[in-house]
Amino acid sequence: MLDHLSSNIEWLKSINTANFEQRALELFRHQYKNTAIYREYCNHIHRTPERVHTLTDIPFLPISFFKSHEILAQDQAAQLLFESSGTTGMIPSRHFIAHPEYYETAFRKGFRQHYGAPEDYIILGLLPSYLERKHSSLVYMVQDLIQTSNHPSGGFYLNEWEQIAGILQQPRDRKIFLIGVTFALLDFAEAYPMDLSAHIVMETGGMKGRREEWTRMEVHQYLAQQWKLEKVHSEYGMSEMLSQAYSKGDGIFKCTESMRVLLRDESDPLETYTAGSGCVNVIDLANIDSCAFIATEDIGKVAADGSFEILGRRDTAALRGCSLMVV
């Protein structure tokens, strides 16, 4: 198991709520065996397979390792590279992808799970800062959804606001799905207020110094006001992950079937729990060839049903217990 591309894709497609924990433990054992840096980390904190029996036993690799190490199974070669956007001068995270098919399987299944068929939408990507980069996982995903949607008006846009406004305001045979980086949506909404109540607007985060930082609530309130939206949707993803979570309003995210969010105690990073508030740990079972168990720098709140909110990010000037070590 987990040794052949075609069988791995079927393994990934078959993940559901009932078998998630079993699949996560299978992948943990596989990655302990095949991903050297993860095995070294597990050994260092004394969390070897003999001690791991439940989801909360699994060790989560600090996300900073994606900046300092090549996280890839030792028998695999990278076919693709995703990098975090970051700000100028920051070291980007680098996610080496041996099989792009796993990413494609995860985001295609996840989109259909939450929104239905891409063919039901005209998909517009307002992602200027991402289009300017060569290794954006978000652009890769949206490009695939646009191609699957196969509508002549769909596509990527940098700053062609007048053209986008024309598409949005004309009568259409499909609902429009406008997905954009936060600062670009805010700029566009300021310049072109209109009624988009019949469509879906999704922000993907990312101010990156382009505007004054706003809270998600402030962003959503402004977009809703400018575009007469009942709710603003959001996507939670990152270059280190191949699965996503989606919010259909109020910043409440629900994971796709290949992903789950847990929490860790800020003062004890090895204390993992399933609900409450704390530092966010992500299980991403599409990360077959890298590491599926990631200790992020986000602070979150997880409900009993697995839905979650992102409350902010840790103060990296005071790492405290959320960052344990550097191998």
Image (cartoon, rainbow, N blue to C red):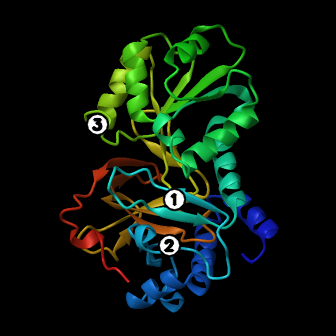
Badge 3 crowding class, 10 Å Cα cut-off, few under 14, some 14 to 19, many 20 or more, is few
The extreme right residue here reads 6
In this orientation, does residue 203 appear?
no
Q: How far apart are marks 2 and 1 (CA)?
A: 10 Å
Tell which circle, 3 or 2, labels the residue nearer the N-terminal end.
Answer: 2
Q: Nearer the viewer, residue 111 or 40?
A: 40
On screen, residue 243 versus residue 46, left or right, reads right
Q: Do the residues labelled 2 and 1 touch (CB within 8 Å)?
A: yes
Q: Give the amino acid at mark 3.
A: Thr
The extreme left residue here reads 318
Q: Position of residue 19 (x, y in %)?
A: 65, 66
User: From the viewer's perspective, is residue 292 above or below residue 250?
Assistant: below
Residue named by callout 3: 215
Q: Position of residue 326 (x, y in %)?
A: 34, 80
The residue lying at 46 percent from left, 44 percent from top is 253
In this orientation, does residue 70 appear?
yes
Q: Distance between the residues labelled 3 and 1?
A: 24 Å
The number of callouts visible is: 3
Q: Do the residues labelled 3 and 2 touch (CB within 8 Å)?
A: no
User: From the viewer's perspective, is residue 129 above or below residue 50?
Assistant: above
Secondary structure beneath dot 1 equals strand
Q: How far apart are marks 3 and 2 (CA)?
A: 32 Å
Q: Where is residue 184 in the image (x, y as percent from the top left)?
A: 42, 29
The residue lying at 32 percent from left, 33 percent from top is 217
Badge 1 crowding class, 10 Å Cα cut-off, few under 14, some 14 to 19, many 20 or more, is many
The disc placed on residue 260 is 1
Badge 2 crowding class, 10 Å Cα cut-off, few under 14, some 14 to 19, many 20 or more, is some
Tell which circle, 2 or 1, labels the residue nearer the N-terminal end.
Answer: 2
Secondary structure beneath dot 3 equals loop
Residue named by callout 2: 55
